[in-house]
């Protein structure tokens, strides 16, 4: 599970977290695992950065945190999307799509 | 997963408190690390290695902790603020709805508060503007006035002689500088005839002390305070506007003043009016130069002196230094300075000290009005609260905390207070205009009064305070509602006995406070009455007074005498004029025109030097007593033959006769009096009635009247008795004076009635305001009594109905209700009388002819309060009698 050289673009982590949370409320560890599994660990996201992003999103009002019990009956902090978070995710997703399409167009014509 | 997402959001549950944020972040990250460690251990690592790997994978743990904590704390503060504002919005919305639901209550409460807050704001404006605000000069608290005082004459404050002033200035070290000013008049031939400008002649350093630069042009340069260079003037703002239309080009122009050309070098800003408490404001400043002869004058004191304390020196330093300088001078010049000390008074104190007691009394009175207003609103709220018992109980049952209900009620109180303040500021605006219109002439700085930021701040402040005052009791009572009772009784007649006691107490206090104010106002009314009853000794109706200044037009005594007689003859010949005379000082006019003179009585042992009795000396023409209708008691009046060739004579007043010749007839006796520097021995030819000259409240002093031809001063005032409105005759009188000399300036004009009324203005001002407050207080208290009685009667409707049904007569019911009212009123009056007896002593300086414990005043007030409260009780009582027992019982 070595780290790749793929650096995350500014704001990419945020949108990944929002997407992850759009399925269900999750704790930080859950989000970390979820992203690893989806990306096969290609995006070596440092946990430190993940937690910082979670708190940043919470401060911005895109996610809300609440203490709850984890599956193994431990106290854990769960995050869930707010209405604003959902809106943000939609906006970011379409931006990303446009961005990616543009890049692909350039790369494929080459 | 057992948490309910969004629960906190919907029910606004409290967030983490500040200290818990750290714990929160720590345990979140701890959870993560443990989960990761477990995952790694499951894949075959030793627990030790797994923990290390988990930490490595995590990255910078410490930084992340700090970062998250910081964000969370900010988030937390933000949410708390939001929650607070949210609750406030909610409370405000709810309060508005509640107030809107009972418009009658809201209107009465707001108007009551508006009266209280408005009156307080208006009086505060006056107190602030007159007493509190610094004078409009830079570092005005360093400015002082300096006076001579004569220990032999009981420390009377006096002007300063030139030689003393110069010695004070050269010897003192505690002052940055001191300067002298002398009132003066410049004749000026204007487009509307000759007039006299009031001038301050000021010594060098004056403008530097005041630290006020000219608005236009400049003030005087140092060399302009030397002989030959002093032909310059600085204009006052008022004169500049009035006479020169505010035209800046007047600077540099030359005006002919007193026959001499003088160049205008500057104009002072409008607020520069130093000194204002001495006679009328001056309109012009000119340099004062002391010549060699004047520098030696130590006996004649006529300079007003002001100084600025030097850096580092205090008022105490200045006082110590000045008293030692005064002692040195006493030792060096025993002939003139034996008993002369030096007084140092802060300039602000000098200007406003004399009005402070009255203003503070008014401020106290108006605070009482506000207290009563608060009491009324508190009672209204308590009455309302008893109807809202059910509402509070329901809210409490639904889980509203005690704090939340209190907070809700305080929000309602605040909204009421703020509405009251808004209406009150409007009232205060009119009130301040009233104060300015009514203000006595000696209320300094009154023209500057205006409602500004400071005053608005004050209004806001007292409205918060009042909200607390009137809102606290109802809120606290609501905070411990009896849930069970409130719900069970269906919100009706569930008033506890505690609340009743509180409401009774509030009404008793209202009555007491109103009683105190009425006693105060009553004492002032009685003082005013006794003042008007004072035997003034002259008749003031239809008398015109015109000040003229003839020194420089008629330079010899003979010319002045001739002018006076000739002009009096011409004026007396005018149709509509009954008689005309003249005097050097008029009753109740500018006290500075009155001359004090020392007398020695022939045939009586001469008192030690410096302790000669002093009398008021007035120069009069022979017609004066007839014009003013001053009664002759013994001997004869003056005639025109008592002139410079005849033997020196004088008339004296009764006080003087009693004082110096208590056992014998004064007529024919002789005394020596010094006037215009010359001692003359005069024979008493008659005794006239005492005339109140300084003020109606000042007991008459020994007075001497000398005939003008024998002491032909050039500063005289014509008095003209007319058969109708004296002011209508003014143009004709002026014309006849000018027909003799068309350049003679008329210094000022007035009527004796006007002077009389002016002299009473300060008392009238205090009286009107205090009476106004007292009437407001009584009305509010009556409303309070009425409100309480109505409410109490309503609550007892069924009981009364039952009594009636059981055969009680109307009279019994009336007694039942009135007994309660009488108990309240009498308790209030008793408390009020006791309080008044203790408090009215502060009024003693404002009283005349009555003591502060004047029995008739107290009795009248007691009767008035009982009568008014009686009406306020009777109306609800009569309603109670008319209760239909069937209806009352059916509503059960």
Image (cartoon, coloured by chain):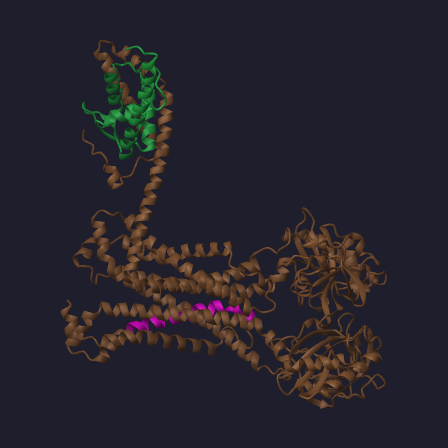
Chain colours: A green, B brown
Camera-side residue: A98 or B283?
Answer: A98
Q: Quadrant of the N terminus of chain B?
A: top left
Task: Count how many numbered circles sit on residues in the image.
Answer: 0
**Residue B791 point in image, percent of width and height:** 27, 67
Q: Main secondary structure of the magenta part?
A: helix
Residue found at the very far bottom of the displayed protein:
B635
Question: Where in the figure is residue B680, as x and y percent of width and height?
Answer: 82, 79
Q: Is residue B807 left or right of residue B759?
A: left
Q: Is residue B887 at all visible to an observer of this figure?
A: yes
The answer to whether any part of residue B666 appears in the image is no
The residue at the point 79 percent across, 88 percent down is: B640
* x, y percent for residue A108: 31, 14
Front in this rendered view, residue B96 or B292: B96
Question: Where, quadrant-wise, is the C terminus of chain B in this rendering?
Answer: bottom left
Q: Is residue B537 left or right of residue B385?
A: right
Nearer to the camera, B7 or B44: B7
Pinpoint residue B151: horizontal percent, then vertical percent: 71, 65
The correct choice, above or below, for A32 with respect to B389 in the image is above
Residue B829 included in the magenta stretch of the image: yes
The picture quadrant where one finds residue B571 is: bottom right
Residue that appears at 29% across and 39% down: B14
Magenta-highlighted residues: B819-846
Is the residue B640 above or below the residue B381 in the image? below
**Which of the 4 quarters of the picture holds residue A58?**
top left
Image side of residue B625 versus residue B425, left or right: right
Membership of B525 in magenta stretch:
no
Q: Is residue B490 left or right of residue A77?
A: left
């Amino acid at each position: 599970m070595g780290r790749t050289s793929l650096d995350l673009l500014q704001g990419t982590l945020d949108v990944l977290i929002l997407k992850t949370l759009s399925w269900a409320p999750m704790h930080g560890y859950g989000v970390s695992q979820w992203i690893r599994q989806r990306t096969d660990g290609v995006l070596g996201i440092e946990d430190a950065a993940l937690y910082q992003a979670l708190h940043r999103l919470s401060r911005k009002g895109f996610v809300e945190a609440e203490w709850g019990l984890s599956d193994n009956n431990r106290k854990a902090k769960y995050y869930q999307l707010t209405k604003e978070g959902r809106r943000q995710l939609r906006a970011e997703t379409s931006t990303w799509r446009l961005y990616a399409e543009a890049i692909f167009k350039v790369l494929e014509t080459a | 997963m057992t948490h309910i997402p969004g629960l906190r959001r919907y029910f606004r549950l409290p967030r983490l408190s500040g200290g818990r944020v750290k714990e929160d972040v720590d345990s979140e990250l701890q959870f993560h690390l443990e989960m990761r460690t477990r995952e790694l251990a499951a894949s075959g690592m030793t627990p030790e290695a797994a923990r290390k790997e988990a930490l490595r994978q995590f990255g910078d743990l410490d930084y992340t902790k700090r970062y998250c904590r910081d964000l969370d704390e900010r988030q937390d503060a933000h949410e708390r603020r939001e929650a607070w504002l949210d609750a406030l919005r909610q409370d405000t919305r709810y309060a508005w709805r509640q107030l809107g639901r009972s418009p009658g209550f809201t209107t009465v409460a707001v108007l009551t508060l508006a009266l209280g807050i408005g009156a307080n704001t208006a009086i505060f404006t006056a107190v602030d503007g007159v007493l509190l605000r610094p004078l409009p000069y830079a570092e005005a608290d360093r400015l002082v006035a300096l006076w001579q005082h004569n220990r032999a004459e009981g420390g009377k404050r006096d002007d300063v002689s030139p030689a003393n002033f110069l010695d004070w200035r050269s010897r003192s070290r505690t002052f940055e500088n001191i300067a002298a000013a002398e009132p003066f008049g410049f004749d000026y031939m204007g487009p509307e005839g000759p007039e006299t400008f009031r001038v301050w002649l000021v010594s060098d350093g004056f403008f530097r002390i005041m630290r006020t630069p000219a608005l236009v042009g400049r003030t005087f340069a140092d060399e302009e305070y030397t002989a030959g260079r002093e032909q310059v003037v600085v204009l006052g703002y008022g004169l500049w506007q009035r006479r020169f239309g505010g035209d800046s080009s007047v600077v540099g122009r030359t005006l002919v003043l007193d026959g001499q050309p003088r160049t205008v070098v500057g104009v002072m800003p409008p607020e520069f009016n130093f000194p204002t408490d001495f006679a009328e404001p001056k309109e012009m400043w000119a340099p004062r130069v002391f010549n060699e002869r004047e520098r030696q004058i130590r006996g004649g004191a006529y300079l007003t002196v002001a100084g600025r304390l030097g850096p580092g020196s205090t008022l105490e330093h200045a006082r110590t230094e000045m008293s030692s300088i005064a002692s040195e001078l006493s030792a060096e010049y025993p002939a003139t300075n034996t008993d002369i000390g030096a007084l140092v008074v802060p300039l602000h104190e000098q200007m406003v000290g004399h009005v402070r007691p009255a203003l503070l009394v008014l401020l106290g009175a108006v605070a009482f009005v506000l207290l009563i207003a608060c009491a009324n609103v508190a009672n209204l709220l308590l009455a309302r609260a008893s109807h809202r018992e059910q509402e509070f109980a329901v809210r409490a049952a639904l889980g509203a905390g005690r704090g939340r209900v209190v907070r809700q009620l305080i929000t309602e109180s605040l909204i009421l207070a703020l509405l009251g303040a808004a209406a009150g500021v409007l009232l205060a605006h009119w009130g301040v205009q009233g104060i300015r219109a009514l203000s006595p002439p000696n209320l300094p700085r009154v023209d500057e009064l205006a409602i500004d930021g400071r005053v608005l701040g004050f209004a806001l402040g007292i409205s918060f305070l009042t909200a607390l005052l009137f809102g606290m009791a109802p809120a606290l009572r609501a905070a411990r509602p009896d849930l069970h009772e409130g719900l069970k009784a269906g919100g009706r007649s569930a008033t506890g006995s505690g609340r009743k006691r509180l409401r009774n107490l509030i009404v008793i206090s209202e009555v007491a406070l109103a009683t105190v104010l009425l006693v105060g106002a009553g004492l002032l009314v009685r003082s005013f009455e006794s003042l008007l009853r004072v035997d003034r000794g002259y008749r003031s109706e239809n008398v015109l007074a015109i000040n003229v200044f003839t020194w420089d037009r008629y330079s010899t005594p003979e010319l002045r005498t001739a002018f006076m007689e000739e002009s009096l003859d011409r004026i007396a010949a005018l149709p509509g004029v009954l008689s005309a005379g003249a005097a050097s000082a008029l009753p109740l006019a500018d006290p500075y025109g009155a001359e004090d003179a020392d007398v020695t009585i022939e045939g009586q042992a001469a008192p030690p030097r410096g302790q000669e009795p002093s009398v008021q000396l007035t120069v009069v023409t022979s017609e004066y007593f007839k014009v003013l209708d001053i009664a002759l008691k013994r001997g004869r009046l003056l005639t025109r033959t008592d002139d410079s060739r005849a033997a020196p004579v004088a008339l004296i007043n009764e006080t003087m006769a009693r004082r110096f010749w208590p056992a014998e007839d004064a007529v024919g006796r002789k005394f020596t009096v010094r006037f215009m520097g010359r001692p003359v021995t005069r024979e008493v030819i008659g005794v006239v009635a005492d005339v109140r000259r300084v003020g109606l409240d000042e007991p008459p002093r020994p007075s001497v009247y000398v005939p003008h031809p024998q002491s032909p001063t050039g500063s005289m005032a014509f008095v003209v008795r007319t058969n109708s409105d004296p002011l209508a005759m003014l143009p004709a009188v002026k014309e006849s004076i000018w027909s003799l000399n068309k350049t003679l300036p008329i210094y000022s004009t007035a009527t004796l009635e006007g002077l009389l009324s002016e002299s009473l203005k300060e008392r009238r001002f205090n009286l009107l305001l205090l009476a106004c407050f007292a009437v407001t207080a009584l009305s509010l208290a009556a409303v309070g009594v009425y409100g309480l009685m109505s409410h109490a009667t309503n609550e007892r409707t069924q009981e009364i109905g039952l009594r009636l049904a059981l055969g009680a007569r109307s009279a019994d019911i009336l007694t039942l209700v009135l007994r309660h009212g009488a108990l309240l009123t009498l308790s209030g009056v008793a408390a009020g009388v006791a309080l008044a007896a203790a408090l009215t002593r502060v009024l003693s300086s404002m009283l005349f002819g009555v003591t502060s414990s004047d029995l008739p005043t107290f009795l009248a007030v007691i009767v008035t309060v009982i009568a008014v409260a009686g009406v306020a009780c009777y109306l609800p009582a009569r309603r109670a009698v008319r209760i239909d027992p069937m209806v009352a019982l059916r509503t059960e």
